[in-house]
Amino acid sequence: MSDNQQQAPLPVALQKKERKQLIIKQVNIHTRLMFTDLVKLIDVSEDTIRRDVNELAEEGLLIRIKGGAMSAAYHIGDDSKTYSRNNKLVIADKTLSLLKEDMIVLIGGGTTIREFVKKIPNTLRATFLTVNVMTAVELLDKPMIKTIMIGGQISAYSQMTVSGEVFQYLSNIKADLCIIGINAIDAEGGLTDSDWETIQAKKAMIKAADKIAVLTISEKLNSVMQMKIADVDEVDYLITELSPEDAALSSYRAKELTIL
């Protein structure tokens, strides 16, 4: 997590109920977190985190994945359970301004991207390539969109295809626009995540497009995870629910990107 988030560490003796509520909130913010991320945030043992996550998974409040936890809303596609949905709808509306007729779009997955896909006009004619199964399903509802699913092994962590076939396919294309969600972003630390395979897939996606748009709710700003995907300077558009002039975006305005 970011330095800002760790400046006021929570007490070790945090009550179990409060600890679980914090786990749910952080997993919802970042979509998915590894146990190591949660240990750093809450300052308790990994065994304690594992027990809490297992119990929360049994209660249907999140999904247990290998080495961590994922937001329940990301998996089941229930809009009513989407965290910060109103903010994600604002981001989706802003992202629509980047679309043009007949363009080729490379797109990732996540609940924010799901809201964006739902808002794509049925009259838009374009080609969308995706490495995310759930995004592909959403795109099938758009009558004028040609959807290409880039196949391969599917990551349980990110639900993206991440095998060698994916990297080879991506190395041979050049999309007009790449739209991705992100688990953590920091003006100096860049775009980061905790899963090596997912990171490699997103790196390949970034290289396969002329322009890169990153979609994120503001609660992910100024947070850093274990491994870097790209520097902020490699991004062309940063899209949050905030006004571009918001003080929270000041460090990003200093970078060479457009904030929508």
Image (spheres, helix red, strand yellow):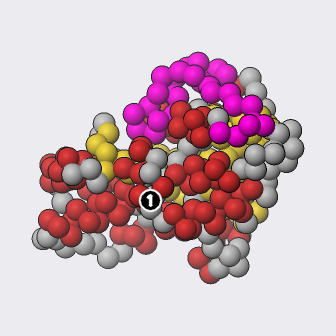
Q: Position of residue 50 (x, y in %)?
A: 19, 48
**Residue toward you, 196 or 77:** 77
Q: Residue furthest right?
A: 101
Residue 145 among magenta residues: yes
The kind of residue tagged 1 is Ser
Classed neighbour count for the residue bearing mark 1: other residues with Cα under 10 Å, few (<14), some (14–19), many (≥20): few
Residue 234 picture location, percent across and down: 70, 50
Residue 19, compared with residue 45, is above or below; it is below
From the viewer's perspective, is 46 left or right of 100? left
Q: How far across and how far down the image is residue 213, in percent?
A: 70, 52
- According to the picture, the residue beneath numbered tag 1 turns out to be 80
Question: Residue 242 placed where, x, y %?
Answer: 63, 73
Quarter where residue 215 is shown: bottom right
Q: Which residues are magenta?
A: 141-170
From the viewer's side, name the closer residue of 78 and 195: 78
Left or right: where does residue 251 sit relative to residue 154? right
Check residue 230 for magenta coloring: no
Q: In the image, what residue occupies the spot 78% across and 37% down? A: 144
